[in-house]
Image (cartoon, rainbow, N blue to C red):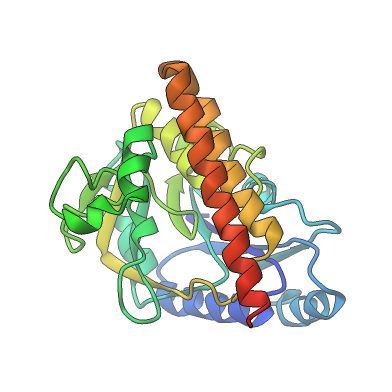
Amino acid sequence: MDLSIIIVNYNTFQLTQNAVESVNSSIGGAIEYEIIIIDNASSEDTQRKLAKTFSSAPHVNLILNRENLGFSKANNIGIRLSSGDYILLLNSDTLVQDNCIPLCLDYIRHNEQIGALGCKLLLEDGSLDHACKRGFPTPDASLYYFLKLHKLFPKSKRFGKYTLSYQDINEINEVDSLTGAFMLLPRSTIDRVGLLDEEFFMYGEDIDWCYRIKKAGYSIIYYPKAATIHLKGQSSKRKKSKIIYEFHRAMLLFYNKHYRSQYPLWVTWLMYAGVYIKMTLAYAFNFLKKNPK
């Protein structure tokens, strides 16, 4: 098996169906592949539709969880079940473009030092989803990003440390981190660095994985010669409290795991204060959206 593609579904049947169809179209017949769909305890109606559509579909292995295990655990289930030499994590809200997967697979096969590779992710309006190439969220990089200095000085390597705004989005570059919406890895990388950290429920696990991959000596590559559409936000127009909580919890979890021991206590206090202020504002904005005057 050349490639195992893992898609986690949670009440996004139509998006998942569209994603699978785009994968089949992108790959054609040149690659031996499998698609493993892990459903995280969606509604009965969604699971019924998934079973009807994919139970006997070619290339597809459908797993129906009885509880929502989170993004990391669900992907890890898929990885353990997979048999491909390469693993592709793919969001359900993506549409893989023509030749994207063969191009990415060919490039990573010919570069053994690559630990993970991501393609160019485009939002529905054609703009770049900047999560597809990022720096690590160090305290200073996070501060510059929070203050929007990368927008004032887009060519600055200092102020653009997190968004990598100074890099040409059409050039192949080594980056710090990719997004789990589209991340291609050799199985040998996973054998060496381990699976996704299941402490991360639905955010931060991709940055953590990339951090561990780079620490192991591999390179992380942004490969814009291939593209995928990311229908970001289609599954949830309004942020629920659980999503807001997990997003900010992931920030603190990543900081505590990788950076806390490297910085003085006052930096940690500032990081915690910044995250809690940001989370409070997110809750407030979400409340106002749900309860407009």
Furthest-left residue in this view: 155
Furthest-front residue in this view: 293
Q: Is residue 105 visible?
A: no
Where's residue 259, x and y in %? 45, 25
Between 245 and 63, the residue placed more toward the observer is 245
- Number of marks drawn: 0
Residue at 40 percent across and 69 percent down: it is 30
Q: Is residue 37 visible?
A: yes
Task: Please tell me whether residue 76 is drawn above or below residue 51 in the rendered image.
Answer: above
- The image quadrant where one finds the C terminus is bottom right
Where's residue 50, x and y in %? 75, 77
Residue at 46 percent across and 43 percent down: it is 207
Left or right, 8 with reference to 212: right
Where's residue 196, x and y in %? 58, 40
Task: Please tell me whether residue 2 is drawn above or below residue 37 in the rendered image.
Answer: above
Residue at 59 percent across and 37 percent down: it is 195
Between 259 and 73, the residue placed more toward the observer is 259
Where's residue 26, x and y in %? 41, 75
The part of the image, by quadrant, that contains residue 154 is bottom left
Residue at 62 percent across and 59 percent down: it is 283
Task: Please tell me whether residue 59 is drawn above or below residue 208 in the rendered image.
Answer: below
Left or right, 181 with reference to 197: left
